Amino acid sequence: MRLTAGSGRGCSPHWLRTLIASLVIGLCSSVLSAQTPPASPGQRFGFDYRTSDLTTFKVERFELQIDGGAWVSVQMPPSAPQPDTPADFTTLAVPIPALTPGDHTVSLRACNSACGDGSPAFAFQMVVQPPAPVRARILGG
């Protein structure tokens, strides 16, 4: 049996166009949903570090790099246990510094007398929300 377009058997051009359109729409919606997470003042960067490596490598401090700029010491940040912290790891938290609204990246690295490699850059979007209006009321005409 031979299958030809429009024969009722196989793929008609309309069916193929519909399939391609569906795939393109699905791909676009996946890309749109993979946006960078929002951050706002007062939040913290969280990162995991193997607990045994803190002592084995005598980690003294961590450094933070924003948008590929200079590395800045954040000392030894406090631990911030989280439900998703893997076993044998410690989640550490660093306050997010004041940044302009928009897209940014952050990398971190551990240091003793020397510093290790930086983590892969983590992309986020700084969002600064305006304060809520006050004294809502009805005004005369």
Image (tube, rainbow, N blue to C red):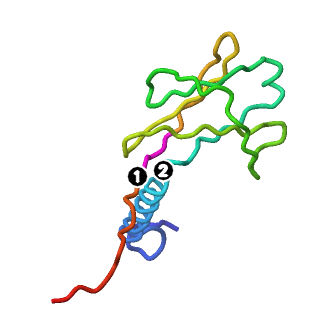
Q: Which residues are magenta?
A: 123-127
Q: Secondary structure at mark 1?
A: loop
Q: Position of residue 11 (x, y in %)?
A: 44, 67
Depth order, front residue of 6/46 = 46
Residue 137 in the image: x percent, y percent? 31, 83
Q: Is residue 88 above or below residue 3?
A: above
Mark 1 = which residue? 128
| In the foreground, 9 or 18 | 18
Q: Label 2 belongs to which residue?
A: 40
Q: Residue at x 67, y 22 (%)?
A: 61
Secondary structure beneath dot 2 equals loop
Residue 127 as seen in the image, left or right of residue 86: left
Q: Does 141 lie within the magenta span?
A: no
Q: Residue at x 55, y 30 (%)?
A: 107
Residue 54 image position (x, y, % from top left): 78, 25
Q: In the visual, does 81 lie left or right of 67?
A: right
Which secondary structure type mostly characterizes the magenta part of the structure?
A: strand
CA separation in Å, label 2 and label 1: 6 Å
* Up-down relation of residue 113 to residue 39 (above or below): above
The answer to whether mark 2 and mark 1 are in CB contact below 8 A is yes
| Left-right relation of 101 to 139 | right
**Amino acid at dot 1:** Val
Give the residue displayed 41% in from the left and 70% down from the top. Answer: 15
Q: Is residue 53 above or below residue 23?
A: above
The residue carrying pointer 1 sits among few (fewer than 14), some (14 to 19) or many (20 or more) residues within 10 Å by Cα, namely some
Q: Quadrant of the C terminus?
A: bottom left
Residue type at mark 2?
A: Ser
